[in-house]
Amino acid sequence: MTLPNDALLAAWNETLARRGRDPAIFDTQRRVLQLFCEVEEVSRAYETESGLTSFKSGEIVALQIGNHAHWPAILLACLRRGIVVLPLERTMSAHERASALQACHASGLIVAPERAIERCEAGGEIAWGDETPVLLKLTSGTTAAPRAIRFRSAQLVADARQICTTMEITEADLNFAVIPLSHSYGLSNLVTSLLVCGVPFAISGDRMPRAVLDDLARTEATVFPGMPLFYQAFCEMPNVPSLPKLRLCISAGAPLTRKIARNFKKKFGRAIHSFYGASECGGICYDRAVTDEREGFVGPAMDGAKISPNERGDGPTQIEVRSAAVGDGYFPEPEPAKLSAGVFRPDDLVEISAAGFRLAGRLSDVINVAGKKVNPAEVEAQLLSYEGVRQAVVFGRASASRNEEVAACVVADERTNETALLEFCRARLSGWQVPKRVFLVAELPVSERGKISRREIAAHFAA
């Protein structure tokens, strides 16, 4: 069943020959859960003794097991049997999962390694053609309907190597795995980095920031691929543990504000490196130097990635990303204008300078106020500069006279009020950029990936 000349299996065989008797996966007490050779043993057991044997090559099996130590082994077993893996986040609702399984024509679902694989009605053999994928990354289009991105092994291998080379992560490091392994960020920085580059990880299923920080110290992890929400929570904690082994802090999944970065460095003495990527192509940019203080700065291109502007001239523009890690296309409905032939065109608006790239918002988020375009990121930057404001999301609301009006949701301390924030914005923004309303909330809803959905917040405050 093994795919001939599979790049990921070939890379794993090299890792196994080099690191077979070394620890691969730890728990949060720093106990060894699996050696590299034991990852191989577990994968062989899944390949021959589990329900995977009832699926044909080319069929899709969804994997929804959270941050489980068997994740890499199950991926390897599916690779050898030619089964296409569809990772799903553990926190998906039953409705979201059913929609994803149907849209992607999944044949099976694994929700726990110790339970039998569930059969799905929508599945069956798929005519993949010459570019049969090994993995589908779930994403959504502008309509929020689920769809997936097709990846072959060579693209997953390229992404893992580009990450480890650019970030200077080696097999001497220990990653801390709290971000979801099912998400593109966790898959590349943790799962395939272990299989391809031999980088072990300590696995955590706890999302409480205090527990994460304590476990990070206890495991003596050297690399923390995190998200802004963790770094912000760490900054606000009293009596924090020392982190003498931690040498590299990475932030992705959502924009990292300068305020959080400065507070973290002041408290822990370490810089946070912003990492910009996309499910469609893996890593795009990485802030190696951490010297640019501009909001949204994400550094130069990743090693192996080529970035070019869609338009010439000054100001934010869309970009095209080319690398060996770019996926083959969307599934089941392709969108070649956005993703095809090794080129991905994100919806992000990007400012380009000699120092690197700065995220300036998304094309779909631009608010049309009586014909004038408002970039939410510019308004958010002003709100975040106000003393006491911790988080801010700006969005458009329907307006009978101006097409749209600007509104904002803000998380701030108890001394902050709407009137003061509006006066602050009027002094620093053009009239059409100033929010008509600022809603003060206790917290903003965050997905398992650490992202805040502007679309959901806008819908909630639409009236």
Image: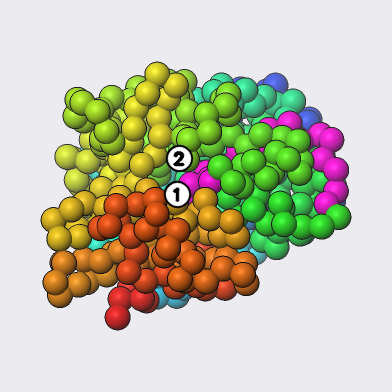
**Residue 104: where, in percent of width, then height?**
32, 58
Q: Which residues are magenta?
A: 240-257
> Per the image, is 201 magenta?
no
Q: Marks 1 and 2: in contact by CB < 8 Å?
A: yes
**Residue 349: where, in percent of width, then height?**
30, 40
SS majority, magenta: loop
Q: Quadrant of the C terminus?
A: bottom left
Q: How dense is the environment of label 1, judged by Cα within 10 Å: few (below 14), some, or many (20 and up)?
A: some
Relative depth, front residue between 185 and 181: 185
> Per the image, is 252 magenta?
yes
Q: How is the image coloured?
A: rainbow
Give the residue number, with chain letter if any, for mark 2.
296
**Residue 201: where, in percent of width, then height?**
70, 40
Query: Which residue corresponds to the image point at 42% horizontal and 69% vertical from the top-left?
Result: 438
Above or below, 355 relative to 225 = above
Give the residue number, with chain letter if any, for mark 1.
381
**Residue 142: where, in percent of width, then height?**
25, 57
Q: Residue 362: which disc?
A: none
Q: How dense is the environment of label 2, judged by Cα within 10 Å: few (below 14), some, or many (20 and up)?
A: many
